[in-house]
């Protein structure tokens, strides 16, 4: 399967991972910056959170792992939480903005 197809499949799976505080998935919130899968089956998710010190960081990272680990191509998942570039509301999809009542 082509790399872009795999990336698209993985991003679709991540749409099932909700931010527990906001009730919107992490992809539409704009929290997922990149998903890569290497030849050994290691999936690397580069993402951020809406705020530093988020008490649910561990829960969200675990949900990300659980969303991807059942894919046959994936042997392990590494969730890399970064703070640069910082998350802003501009990264949210139109869907997320509507769901949260943000203009």
Image (cartoon, rainbow, N blue to C red):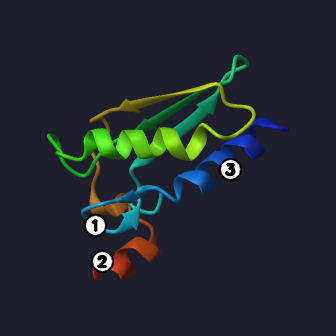
Does any portion of residue 33 appear in the rendered image?
A: no
Q: 3 or 20: which is nearer to us?
A: 20
Distance between the alpha carbons at the discs numbered 2 and 1: 8 Å
| Contact between labelled residues 1 and 2, with CB atoms less than 8 Å apart | yes
Say which quadrant the C terminus sits in.
bottom left
Q: Where is residue 16 in the image (x, y as percent from the top left)?
A: 52, 59
Q: 97 or 13: which is nearer to us?
A: 13
Q: Which of marks 1 and 3 is in front?
A: 1
Question: What residue did someone put label 1 on?
Answer: 22
Name the side, left or right, on which 14 lies relative to 79: right
Q: Report the residue at 67% width, 30% height from top.
A: 74
Q: What element carries label 1?
A: loop
Q: Where is residue 42 in the image (x, y as percent from the top left)?
A: 61, 23
Whichever of callouts 1 and 3 sits on the residue coming sooner in the sequence is 3
| Contact between labelled residues 3 and 1, with CB atoms less than 8 Å apart | no
Q: Report the residue at 62% width, 56% height from top.
A: 12
Q: Position of residue 93 (x, y in %)?
A: 45, 67
Question: What residue did someone put label 2 on?
Answer: 100
Say which quadrant the N terminus sits in.
top right
């Amino acid at each position: 399967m082509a790399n872009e197809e795999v990336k698209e499949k993985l991003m679709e799976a991540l749409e099932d991972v909700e931010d527990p505080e906001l009730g919107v998935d992490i992809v539409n919130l704009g929290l997922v910056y990149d998903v890569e899968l290497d030849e050994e089956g290691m999936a690397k998710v580069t993402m951020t959170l809406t705020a530093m010190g988020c008490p649910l960081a561990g829960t969200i990272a675990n949900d990300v792992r659980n969303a991807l680990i059942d894919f046959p191509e994936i042997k392990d998942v590494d969730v890399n939480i970064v703070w640069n570039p910082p998350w802003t509301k501009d990264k949210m999809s139109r869907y997320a903005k509507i769901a949260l009542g943000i203009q």
